[in-house]
Amino acid sequence: MDTIEIHDDEIKSEEILAKIQENIRRRKESGSYLDPMPEILNRNTPEIILKGNETISKDLEYLTTNYEVHNKNYFISSHRHIIGDSLIKGRKMVNDEVKRYIDPVFVKQTELNACNARISRELMRKNGELNLKMEEFNLKMEEFNLKMEEFNLKINEMNMKIEELNSKILEDFNLKINEMNMKIEELNSKILEDDTKIEELNSTFSAEFNKKNIFKTSWGEYYNEDVTEGDLIGNINHHKHFISLIEEYAQKASNGIPKLLEVGLGTATMSIYFSRQQYDVLGIDNDINIIYNAIDTNKRLGGHANFVLIDANYLDILKNSSFDIAFSQGTLEHFGNDGIIRMLSKQLEVAKYVVFSVPSINYPKSEFGNERKMTIEDWEVILKSGGFNIVKIEYYREDTQIACIIQKKD
């Protein structure tokens, strides 16, 4: 539609001009003339190119550039020299009149095209922004994935180290368990050996003790009552100082578990007490009833001591067993000087130290048997006459008891 052909011989210019002028006048009066077409679309909007969508970008550029449907390149001219000007004017008037009918449609179409182009460009701009954000997001995801890989590598390294550590700990633990088991086996073996020796002692000397009528004495009847935990605690607390001396010198004499020998059991509470403190304890007495009572009390009160029927004057049988301490409480005061010296000498043959406790002259009451209540000076005279190495001799329990420590001579 770049050119409109109008033949001069078909035009009655005067009639046409008159009609056009009349139409123009009427339209002006009715206000139906349109304003010139506005610039709907900003042509200076930056060009949007979508990566990977060059075809869409070209189509959008074409829509933006060609939204205008008017033919602004139309030019009216005439080749006639004489009436050319009149014809041009007439044609322009006809063209303007035609535009008054057609332009509203073109204007609406142009506006619609412009809106489509504007919306399309905005959508593509938003799409471009989203694509940029997606690229940024993808980059961050790649960075995150790399960090996750590094983190997983560190976790794996840590797990490997933990496994190595657990393996090492388990190996060390198993080694220690094996060592402990070996020590337990050795200890059990030693206990079995001691039990065997005890059985041998009982079987070997029962006949000889029977001949001498030493199985039953009045002491067996005196200590025949059941002993309770309260009795044990009471006796230990009463002789607390004496107990502490035994513990002190047992630690000095021993390189491992201290071995104790109690001579003359009475209620056997001291042997049972020390056995519960993880001492290796052997208790002896020459009365079968005392031995029976000691075994029963040991079982009831959770002790671990061993008890054997032996007279204190026959400790030669134990010379192969080495004790750290031989102790007695309330025993030696029932013997004469020679008997005391003989019993202490026998005990020093099998022990490094002898620790004994006896009631002093200040003891307020008389108990069972022929007790000799003497002073420290009296005891020193007896001990020196026997040639003993006295480490310590002292009163305790408000001077009612005497404790003495004798050391074996080299």
Image (cartoon, rainbow, N blue to C red):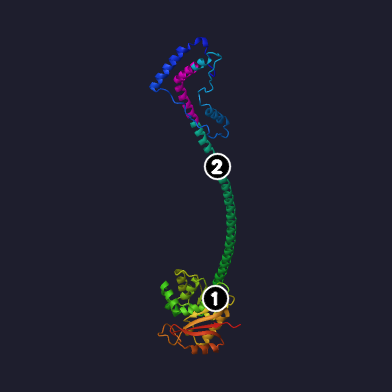
Question: Dot 2 corresponds to which residue?
Answer: 136
Q: Look at the image and tell me in which quarter the C terminus lies.
A: bottom right
Spot occupied by residue 186 in the image (x, y as percentages of width and height): 58, 66
Quick one: 192 or 214, which is closer to the camera?
Answer: 192
Camera-nearest label, 2 or 1: 2
Q: Are marks 2 and 1 in contact (CB under 8 Å)?
A: no
- Reply yes or no: does residue 83 show up in magenta: no
Spot occupied by residue 240 in the image (x, y as percentages of width and height): 46, 78
Question: Dot 1 corresponds to which residue?
Answer: 251
Magenta segment boundaries in residue numbering: 90-117
- Reply yes or no: does residue 108 show up in magenta: yes
Quick one: 375 or 112, which is closer to the camera?
Answer: 112
Residue depicted at x 59% and y 52%: 157
Q: Secondary structure at mark 2?
A: helix
Spot occupied by residue 83 in the image (x, y as percentages of width and height): 52, 13
In the displayed orientation, state which residue is furthest to the right: 410
| Residue 276 visible in the snapshot | yes
In this view, 384 is above or below 68: below
